[in-house]
Amino acid sequence: MATKYIFVTGGVTSSLGKGIISASLAKLLQARGFSVTIQKFDPYINIDPGTMNPYEHGECFVTEDGAETDLDLGHYERFLNRPTSQANNVTTGRIYHHVITQERQGAFLGKTVQVVPHITDEIKRRLLLLGQSGEYDIVITEIGGCVGDIESLPFIEAVRQLRWELGVNESCVIHLTLLPYLKAAGELKTKPTQHSVRSLSEAGVQTDILVCRSEHPIPVEMRKKIALFCNVKVNSVIESLDADTIYDVPLLMRKEKLDERVINKLKLPHRADPDLDAWKEFLGRLKNPTAEVNIALVGKYVELKDAYKSIIESFIHAGAANECKVNIKWLQSENINAENVASFLHDMDGVLVAPGFGERGFAGKLEAIRYVRENRIPFFGICLGMQCASVEFARNVLGLKDAASTEMIPDTPHPVIDLMEGQKEITEKGGTMRLGAYTCELKRGTKAFSIYGKSKISERHRHRYEFNNKYLAAFEEAGMIASGINPDTGLVEVIELPEHPWFVAAQYHPELKSTVLNPHPLFVKFVKAAMNYNKSN
């Protein structure tokens, strides 16, 4: 069977949930036995989101092969339980960079390089790339931004051309739109949806299926009106109501028969009904917890929850695995000091110190770690959280008062965290960190080994600084051990305090590999430790 292509566009407003709809549709098709992947095309000119402030774009999701990508790729992986790659996220910046590089090399034989055909040809090439691998029956492409934006125009034009070239029944366009509810009028309004579909039509792309986000059920008469004005069949007007959890959306879309509409449009073979038993089981555990814990997330970007999206979702997966509701208390690390730390953390069942870059909020993270170490509260550190745990231990246990990371204090006399050797000559910021999957070996008899149940693991990284091995012997003598080491470089990957009930910190990002069907063991066991702490107090 030739690969079929689904294009998901959005209109009226951003943040309608194109990523969740794409992931939910992919889940339904995968549950029917099709091989599916999803890619995200972003209209911004950055090469990737790696250099963006998390407040600007939420978290930066890192793939196995080391690509810094949009956070929607995290949703794709969590729903499909399959890793994504560099090919799954393409930006305008990457497209133009490639075309300009080709032009400089003389690839266009002196021709004038233009948006059409050169930019659109490159977009089309990338749209088809995953499909040509032979691995997938269906490729879903989410086009970022809103229809009508200047930035999105080349992508929409490429979709128009590609649909024409692919032929009938080889592609499908799903347009996600908003039906706003006017309180004063007491009704939903369809006009924004009509205008959005018209904009898409003016660009030469006809919508096949309309997914309408709404806070209220859409009456049948309104569906008929939308179908009439937007040139779609009535049964292709899909209602997407606000859900309790994003993990409800596949079941809601199944109820609305979104997957059936797509199968009919693409003339796909009708395979068995989707097997969603494991998914429903997960939802059952998620919605019927038998326990509850309060976990503090100490970070510097807590005002924007999307900055820690994968961590939040990992707690949802781990909570369901433990049949436990995880309440996250968001703590801005800048606000924490020695005087008030107890008031923030004394009633917590666990504390996670989050990743991040830069000096802001560093001191507050150290205070939080000191408090949980001394008061034996379960602690989990990720990336900078692991580095902070090392600095805190060096200062308050080893007595190295000026110990620090050279990221925060370049001329510190005790650089327990230092710039990696390979990073010292690098001046460019984008895509130059230690990125992607690396092997780690866990020492037998350690907590890390018991958590994973094996000695060799692979985890994803995103950092420039590392634990300085010159201090390792002193740390281990004082009671903090390196339980995970990279076998090729000797870099410390995991540290822990064996005398503490649960004190584990990792240089890598375990949250990037947690999925609905495979919750990450570190999160599962951390939530379990928080439950045990809660019971014993």
Image: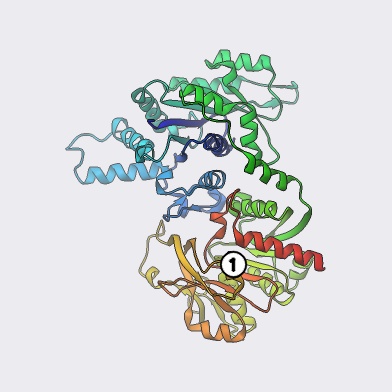
Q: Splitting the image into 4 quarters, where does residue 24 fall?
A: top right
Dividing the picture into quadrants, the one containing residue 250 is top right
Residue 197's x, y, as percent? 52, 22
Which scheme is used to colour this image of the protein? rainbow
Query: Mark 1 is on which residue type?
Result: Gly
Q: Percent position (x, y) of residue 142?
A: 48, 36
Q: Residues within 10 Å of mark 1 (few under 14, many from 20)?
A: many
> What is the count of numbered marks?
1
Spot the residue most to the front.
Answer: 272
Q: Tell me if 383 is positioned left or right of 94 in this view.
A: right
Element carrying mark 1: helix
Judge left or right: residue 271 versus residue 366: left
Left of 173 or right of it: where is 17? right
Which residue is pictured at 48% across the width and 68% down the height?
440
The residue most toward the right is 537
Q: Give the image quarter of residue 176.
A: top right
> Which residue is at a point 56% across and 24% down the rendered structure image?
210
Q: Which residue is mark 1?
A: 385
Q: Can residue 360 be seen? A: no
Name the one closer to the observer, 386 or 492.
492
Q: Nearer the viewer, residue 420 or 263?
A: 263
Residue 430 against residue 158 in the figure, above or below: below
Task: Judge whether residue 391 can be spotted in this image.
Answer: yes
Q: Position of residue 262 (x, y in %)?
A: 51, 26
Residue plotted at (61% across, 31% down): 253
Which quadrant would the C terminus be assigned to in this image? bottom right
Residue 365 vs 411, above or below: the answer is above
Query: Which quadrant does the N terminus fall into?
Result: top left
From the top left corner, tell me how far across and down residue 168 is, in percent.
Answer: 40, 20
